[in-house]
Image (spheres, rainbow, N blue to C red):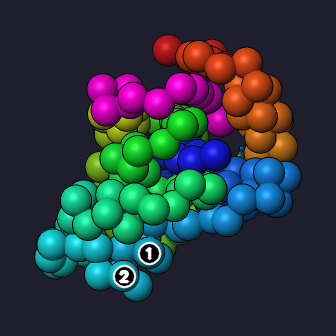
Amino acid sequence: MRLCITGTPGTGKTTVAKILSEKLRLPIYNLSDIVKEKKLYKSFDEGRDAFIVDIEKLREFFKDKHRFIAEGLVAHYIPCDVLVVLRAKPDVIRERLKERNYTTEKVEENVEAERIAYCATEAFENFSGKVFIHIDTSNRTPEKIVNVIIEGVKRGGIVEEIDWL
Ligand code: DAT
């Protein structure tokens, strides 16, 4: 199974991916690490302190891989069978990101991105797999989210557990 987890920073991708990879016994790829390690970027944006991912190189890296969990902000660009989009209320994103050493500007940029569903919209538009799972993580534990994903994989189609939209 090729399972990708995308979402705005702070939605819980890394947390959920770790539990899921143990339960499903799938290797996990953290895309921020892989992009740096394998140089899957076009350039480095000093202003935003972030790599500009080369989507073609990213897809090429995963082309011959058939069993994995990939998690990261650009995960929805990787061809997959199951695409999970994690969401959270903008205020919850703010609180979670404040705990990190993000600047106020970066925190607010991500809060706004989540408010307008930037990542979720891109993910839905790019999706061509079998299962699409859309979950609000604001009031769900990581374990509960993992259970929703596993049930969704069994059921197939579009699965939504969203309370606030
Ligand atoms: P991401 O990888 O999407 O940036 P993360 O897994 O690093 O997110 O989690 C961000 C923070 O939120 C981290 O402090 C753990 C916490 N968190 C993750 N999932 C959560 C959940 N379901 N409920 C409450 N807190 C959660």
Distance from disc 1 to disc 2, alpha carbons, whole Å, reads 6 Å
x then y, percent, for residue 94? 49, 47
x then y, percent, for residue 36? 36, 81
Q: Residue at x 47, y 30 (%)?
A: 129
Q: Secondary structure at mark 2?
A: loop
Q: Residue furthest bottom?
A: 37
Q: Residue furthest front?
A: 64
Residue at disc 1, CB closer than 8 Å to ligand 1: no
Q: What is the magenta range?
A: 124-140
Q: Residue at x 57, y 26 (%)?
A: 131
Tell me: residue 71, above or below residue 93: below
Dot 2: within a 10 Å radius of its alpha carbon, few (fewer than 14), some, or many (20 or more) residues?
Answer: few
Q: Residue at x 57, y 48 (%)?
A: 2
Tag 2: residue type?
A: Lys
Q: Residue at x 77, y 40 (%)?
A: 146
| Residue 11 visible in the snapshot | no
Dot 1: within a 10 Å radius of its alpha carbon, few (fewer than 14), some, or many (20 or more) residues?
Answer: some
In-image side of 138 versus 158 (left or right):
right
**Is residue 131 inside the magenta stretch?**
yes
In-image side of 78 versus 26 (left or right):
left
x then y, percent, for residue 40? 29, 73
x then y, percent, for residue 90? 47, 35
Asked if the residues shown at circle 1 and circle 2 are in contact, with their CB atoms under 8 angstroms apart, the answer is yes
Tag 1: residue type?
A: Ile
**Is residue 26 inside the magenta stretch?**
no
Quadrant of the rendered image containing residue 155: top right
Is 108 or 5 nearer to us in this picture? 5
- Residue indicated by mark 1: 34
Residue 45 is marked as none
Quadrant of the rendered image containing residue 52: bottom left
- Residue indicated by mark 2: 38
Tell me: residue 87, above or below residue 22: above
